[in-house]
């Protein structure tokens, strides 16, 4: 039988919800899981936001009672992570500040506070919601904080940049200026990960001369006044961009492992061929590249390009198709001819491909077209005998 100290370590490596489930194993685990150092309190596990207001109020109170009871019985002197998801906090200011103070008193290393409303439309980039909470002043006293994640939560930038140990920063559902991002990198020398989600009033996004530690960068449906993204990060490993098509100026070196580009919010096709060409050319050394179907549609190319000639009559098989490309993920498939040409080329020429997953766009009538897509896939000649194709 493993000693408690080992079980405490194991339980702290599990997500909070999974740690809670271990209490059904035995009476001993009822004691063990409460020693986790990875705390996550999410009101969505209690509150059903599609139910009547009175029911939601009762559910929210149950969540508050659960948190109070759980924290009152917490015996560990320190914690690694504290995450709180709590919408509409205006009537519970004292409760929320008390929970945050509890985490600070336990010298938390990773602090996450999300006050966004789950009913907000993530795909609507035009709506701006006022931040629902202000970060309490006592949080800025914890200089050893390594990660901070703030969603719909205002903060004081002059104090935030004094967190010299920060390695990871996430901001979401808030107004954010480009000068704040610049100040972060100028003052937080350990910063390795930056994520911005649904931030607005950014003049543009420009990182130049940043410390070489930056490895992960996520820009998710942010609103830029000038649609220009400039990044100089020689050691960047992962880059994700989701939003409108912008002019990209990237200097990312040869260390890039994965890039995910999604222009799914665009509602029409515009002549962005040069922008897309420049972006994909910059990312040519990326080991895993995920792009949305928008990049496969008809648009004005910056050079003479005939999709039929290139994908159908051009029999050249690139080296990656012969030796390394094993998985292809297609997002937002619409059944356009350029998409068919490209996928047919990959299916026929991918010598070592193992899996192709095709996700049909919600804008397509799935019931009407799904069977046609499946028939086409079944009849397409395959270059790899082990290739499995799924479409949903």
Image (cartoon, rainbow, N blue to C red):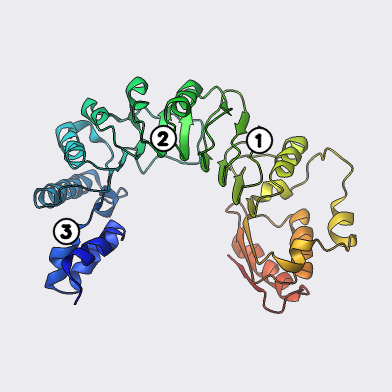
| CB contact under 8 Å: marks 3 and 1 | no
Q: Looking at the figure, which quarter contains the C terminus?
A: bottom right
Lower sequence index among marks 1 and 2:
2
Point out residue 203 in the picture as x, y percentages from the top left corner: 55, 22
Which residue, given by chain and number where applicable, does mark 2 sit on? 171
Could you tell me how far apart the alpha carbons at marks 1 and 2 are, in whole angstroms?
22 Å
Q: Secondary structure at mark 1?
A: strand
The residue mark sitting in front, 1 or 2, is 1
Question: Residue 1's quadrant in the figure?
Answer: bottom left
Going by the image, does 264 lie left or right of 323?
left
Could you tell me how far apart the alpha carbons at marks 2 and 3 are, in whole angstroms?
29 Å
Q: Which mark is residue 250?
A: 1
Q: Report the front residue among 85 and 20.
A: 20
Neighbourhood count class around disc 2 (C-alpha, 10 Å): few under 14, some 14–19, many 20 upward: many
Point out residue 103 in the picture as x, y percentages from the top left corner: 20, 41
- Relative to 143, does residue 29 appear above or below in the rendering? below
Lower sequence index among marks 2 and 3:
3
Point out residue 75 in the picture as x, y percentages from the top left corner: 11, 52
Q: Which mark is residue 229?
A: none
Q: Report the front residue among 372 and 25.
A: 25
- Relative to 262, does residue 25 appear above or below in the rendering? below
- Relative to 220, does residue 126 appear above or below in the rendering? above
Query: What's the residue at 46%, 39% (across, down)?
Result: 195
Could you tell me how far apart the alpha carbons at marks 3 and 1 are, in whole angstroms?
46 Å
Q: Which mark is residue 34?
A: 3
Neighbourhood count class around disc 1 (C-alpha, 10 Å): few under 14, some 14–19, many 20 upward: some
Q: Report the front residue among 102 and 266.
A: 102
């Amino acid at each position: 039988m493993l000693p408690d100290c080992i079980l405490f370590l194991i339980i702290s490596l599990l997500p909070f919800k999974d740690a809670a489930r271990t209490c059904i194993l035995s009476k001993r685990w009822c004691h063990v899981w409460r020693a986790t150092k990875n705390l996550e309190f999410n009101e969505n596990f209690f509150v059903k936001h599609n139910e009547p207001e009175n029911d939601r109020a009762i559910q929210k109170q149950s969540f508050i009672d659960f948190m109070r009871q759980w924290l009152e019985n917490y015996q560990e002197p320190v914690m690694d992570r504290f995450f709180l998801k709590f919408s509409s906090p205006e009537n519970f200011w004292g409760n929320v500040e008390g929970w945050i103070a509890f985490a600070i008193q336990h010298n938390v290393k990773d602090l996450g506070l999300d006050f966004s409303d789950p009913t907000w439309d993530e795909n609507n980039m035009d709506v701006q919601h006022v931040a629902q909470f202000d970060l309490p002043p006592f949080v800025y006293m914890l200089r050893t904080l390594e990660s901070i994640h703030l969603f719909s939560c205002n903060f004081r930038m002059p104090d935030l940049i004094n967190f010299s140990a920060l390695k990871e920063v996430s901001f979401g559902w808030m107004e954010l200026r480009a000068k704040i991002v610049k100040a972060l990198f100028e003052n937080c020398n350990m910063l390795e990960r930056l994520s911005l989600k649904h931030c607005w009033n950014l003049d543009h996004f420009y990182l130049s001369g940043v410390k070489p530690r930056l490895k992960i960068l996520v820009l998710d449906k942010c609103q830029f006044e000038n649609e220009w993204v400039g990044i100089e990060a020689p050691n960047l490993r992962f880059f994700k961009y989701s939003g409108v098509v912008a002019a990209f100026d990237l200097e990312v070196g040869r260390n890039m492992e994965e890039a995910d580009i999604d222009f799914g919010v665009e509602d029409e096709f515009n002549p962005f061929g040069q922008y897309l060409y420049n972006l994909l050319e910059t990312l040519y050394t990326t080991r895993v590249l995920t792009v949305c179907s928008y990049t496969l549609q008809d648009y004005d190319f910056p050079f003479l390009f005939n999709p039929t000639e290139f994908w159908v009559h051009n029999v050249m098989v690139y080296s990656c198709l012969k030796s390394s490309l094993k998985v292809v993920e297609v997002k937002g498939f619409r059944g356009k001819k350029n998409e068919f040409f490209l996928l047919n080329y990959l299916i026929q020429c991918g010598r070592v491909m193992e899996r192709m997953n095709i996700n049909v766009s919600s804008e397509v009538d799935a019931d009407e077209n799904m069977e046609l897509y499946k028939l086409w896939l079944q009849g397409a000649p395959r270059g790899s005998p082990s290739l499995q194709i799924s479409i949903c």
